[in-house]
Amino acid sequence: MADQRQQHPRIPDVGVRWVPPPALTGFLVLLVAVFGVSYGIGSAVGPVAPGMRPGAVSGSDTGTDQQGGGGMDDMHSDGGR
């Protein structure tokens, strides 16, 4: 009976591929789908603000913050309450 318990040397599995877990695959598919739908909706809706163009800078807006004419610094200047 002791002869039947011989351990066979372990042979590495050369033909076995690594497969990602199904949860990871599902998450990646969901992530791609959400980004695809949001890109499609954003393309259909267009720019958020009227007159907004990619790379366009109007001349009147440049240098406003340096001159103190606007920006976040002037929002709460009501005497420091």
Image: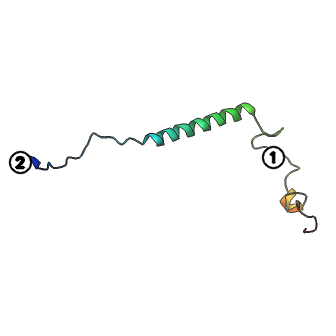
From the viewer's side, name the closer residue of 56 and 36: 36
Amino acid of disc 2: Met
* Mark 2 neighbour density, 10 Å: few (under 14) some (14–19) many (20 or more): few
What amino acid is labelled 1 in the image? Val
Q: Position of residue 67 (x, y in %)?
A: 89, 61
Q: Residue 77 in the image: x percent, y percent?
A: 91, 64
Image quadrant of residue 41? Answer: top right
- Left or right, residue 62 beside residue 24: right
- The image position of residue 38, as x and y in percent, is 66, 36
Q: Callout 1: helix, strand or loop?
A: loop
Q: Earlier in the sequence, mark 1 or mark 2?
A: 2
| Residue at x 84% of width, y 59% of height | 72
- Residue beneath the point at 91% across and 58% down: 69
The dot on residue 24 is none
Q: Which numbered disc covers residue 1?
A: 2
Residue at 85% across / 62% down in the picture?
73
Residue 57 is marked as 1
Q: Residue furthest front?
A: 1
Q: Name the residue at 88% across, 57% down.
A: 70
